[in-house]
Image (spheres, grey):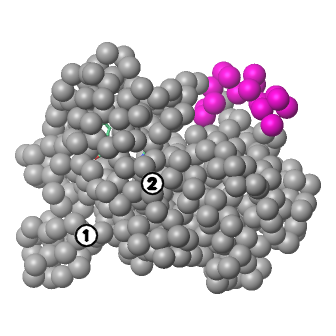
Amino acid sequence: MRILLTGAAGFIAGHVADVARERGHEVVGVDAWLEAAHGASAERDSGPESGIKMVDLRSDALDELLDGVDVVCHQAAMVGNGVDAQDLPAYAEHNDAATARLLAAMARAEVRDLVLASSMVVYGDGRYTCPEHGDVPPAVRREEDLSAGRYDPRCPHCDGDIEWRLIDESTAFLPRTSYAASKVAQEHFAGAWCTLEGARTVALRYHNVYGPGMPADTPYSGVAAIFRSAIERGEVPRVFEDGQQVRDFVHVRDVALANVLSIEQVAGHPQGVTPYNVASGTPFTIGQMARTLAEAAGAGEPEVTGEYRGFDVRHVVASPAAAAEGLGFRARVTPHEGIAELATAALRTR
Ligand code: UD1
């Protein structure tokens, strides 16, 4: 198949291109090579020898490149949680306006299959049950609870204890950050395009992606890169809250495989957006992740600081069942193996 891959110079798309080529596909890579993501090396690396065409999706430069393309795999995005409200326009422009332009170009080129990089952040605080009230969206955590070290969210009806549950794809959207809002909007734009064009989208809602080549610590990095960079500087990981918050760390090679399976199968999906969670299926606490990484790197014990951030969600763990059923995707790298590998893997520096 001929694939147009956006964000091709980035961490995840680089692995998608490798797996796609291994499986015999032709990849046309495009990237805006934004200095904010690629730093001073952008100009040097974006030459023709990189094999990646310099295209800003906010321009109308895609028409020619879409000629003969079977599927678009859209990985280009501004990532992270957002630093402050001044980031809002950048998330809207890079993630939503750019996606809308891409979809319009796909309509002109009559390309009707899209694989979209989405995220678990669309679910916000996740899914919980209360012994008395059943399935509940958790109440937003209160400052007085967080400052007193009470980190678990409570039932919005009785203020009682609630337990986290695996999130499936029917769980309601509850975006809490600029990035999350932009990912929800991206899925909605794709849905509108599917209706207008009789097209199909597979939206892959990634859990916490990590692995070789991930960008080193920046204000927009996730926790795995932050911990790994701290160890490299000779510091120990600083674990926020009590370290018991649960995530799912999914290896970038598995995420790449999920993308290529989607590229190969999106045309067999019904019209509209079909979402799949992309997760390892092995929940890990942040404290456990920090210890596994520090131990493999021969670094000191992580420090549990009790710090907290207002926008953080407490526990988010996805069910990988639908992706297994719909795509035949099962993660191959366990977090124990993958996180130990990350301890010594090269990171991307800008
Ligand atoms: C992360 C990504 C988000 C992605 C999502 C997929 C970032 C910034 N966030 O969200 O883009 O879509 O995974 O599920 O890339 N923590 C520490 N110490 C630190 C930093 C963070 O203990 O120095 C803790 C946080 O308090 C939080 C957890 O680590 O509980 C995860 O934080 P982070 O990786 O920033 O965000 P996610 O919400 O998991």
Q: In this view, does 299 lie above or below 139?
A: above
Dot label at residue 165: 1
- Residue at 26 percent across and 44 percent down: it is 286
Asked whether, in this view, residue 282 is left or right of residue 255, the answer is left
Residue 45's x, y, as percent?
74, 26
Three-letter code for the amino acid on which mark 1 is drawn: Arg
Residue 157 shows in this picture: yes
Q: In the displayed image of the protein, which residue is found farthest to the top?
A: 234
Residue 350's x, y, as percent?
58, 24
**Sequence order check: which comes first, mark 1 or mark 2?**
1
Asked whether, in this view, residue 92 is left or right of residue 214, the answer is right
Residue tagged 2: 332
Write the start and end of the magenta stretch as one range. Answer: 36-51
- Residue at 16 percent across and 68 percent down: it is 163
Quarter of the render that holds ligand 1:
top left
Dot 2, how many residues are within 10 Å of its Cα: few (below 14), some (14-19), or many (20+)? few
Residue 3's x, y, as percent?
77, 57
Q: Is residue 73 above or below residue 239?
A: below
Asked whether, in this view, residue 276 is left or right of residue 61, the answer is left
Q: For residue 43: magenta?
A: yes
Front in this rendered view, residue 339 or 104: 339
Cα distance between the residues tagged 1 and 2: 23 Å
Give SS at disc 2: loop
Asked whether, in this view, residue 2 is left or right of residue 304, the answer is right
Q: For residue 333: magenta?
A: no
Dot 1, how many residues are within 10 Å of its Cα: few (below 14), some (14-19), or many (20+)? some
Three-letter code for the amino acid on which mark 2 is drawn: Arg
In the picture, the quarter occupied by the N terminus is bottom right
Dominant secondary-structure state across the stretch colored magenta: helix
Q: In this view, does 338 lie above or below 40?
A: below
